[in-house]
Image (cartoon, rainbow, N blue to C red):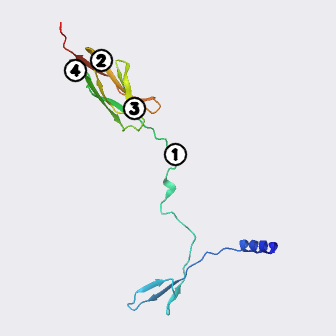
Amino acid sequence: MKQLTTLILIVLLSLPVEAYQAKVYVWRDENGVLVFSDNPRPGAEEVKVEEKNDVLPSVDTSILDITPQVIEDKYEVIVTQPEQNATIRDNSGSVFVSGGIKPIFKRGFKVQLILDGKVYDKAQTHSMFALRNIDRGEHQIKLELLNEKGKVIASSEAVTFYMHRARIN
C-alpha cells in the first residue's frame, strides 16, 4: 500500500501543471451595449483570450540605484549670543549665551560650553547657558556638540566678548 501511494504521488508530481484559464463570454444587451462576463448565457459567444505569463512591473526599476548610501550627519554649531566683540555691561558678571545647531540634534546629544579654553559646568541638552560672576575683561566662548558617547562631533567658532563691571575704588 505504501508503494502504491508513493507511485501515485510521483505520477501526480510529474504531470504538467496547467494554469486555469477563465472563459470570457460576450453578448449585446437589450440596449445594444456589449456585455462581457465570465458567466455564459443563451446567445453569448465565447471570446478566445490569449493569456501570457509575462508579468511586467508597473515601474521601470532598471534606472534605480540600489547601492546602499552612507548618510553622514554634518552638524553646524554657532554662537548666536553674545555677538562677536560685544561688550557686556553687568555688575553681577552675568552673561547669557545661546547657540544654534543645524540640523536639530538627536536624542542623546549634548552641548558643552567652553569658556576661555576650559569646560564650563556640565554638558546639557540645549544650547542656552547662563554664566555667573564672570570677571572683567576679555573672554572667549565656544560651543561643542557631543554625541551620546561624549565625543565632540561639531564645534562653533570662538566668539570674543568683553565683560564690563563697575569697580568701586
166 sits left or right of 72 in the view = left
The residue to which callout 2 is attached is 139
Q: Is residue 149 left or right of residue 94?
A: right
Circle 3 sits in a helix, a strand or a loop, which is it? strand
Mark closest to the chain's N terminus, 1 or 2: 1
Of the numbered discs 4 and 2, the one sitting upstream in the chain is 4
Amino acid type for the residue under numbered disc 4: Ile
Between label 4 and label 1, give the one nearer the viewer: 4
Residue 135 relative to residue 108: left or right? left
Q: Which mark is residue 88?
A: 4
Q: Which residue is mark 1?
A: 68
Q: Nearer the viewer, residue 58 or 142?
A: 142
Q: Quadrant of the N terminus?
A: bottom right
Q: Position of residue 141 (x, y in %)?
A: 32, 22
Q: Disc 2 residue type?
A: His
Which tag is nearer the camera, tag 1 or tag 2?
2
Q: Check the picture and name the quadrant holding the C terminus.
A: top left
Residue extending furthest top? 169
Q: Amino acid at mark 3?
A: Lys
Residue in view at x 55 percent, y 79 percent: 22
Sequence order check, earlier mark of 4 and 1: 1
Secondary structure of the residue carrying numbered label 1: loop
Mark 3 and mark 4 lie on one chain; the one further toward the N terminus is: 4
Q: Residue type at mark 1: give it.
A: Pro
Above or below — where is 4 with respect to 115? below
Task: Give the distance between the C-alpha atoms of the residues marked 3 and 4, in whole angstroms.
Answer: 26 Å
Which of discs 3 and 4 lies nearer the camera? The answer is: 3
Question: Where is mark 3, residue-wise?
Answer: 110
What is the x, y in percent for residue 153?
A: 43, 30
Residue 120 in the image, given as x and y percentages of width and height = 36, 22
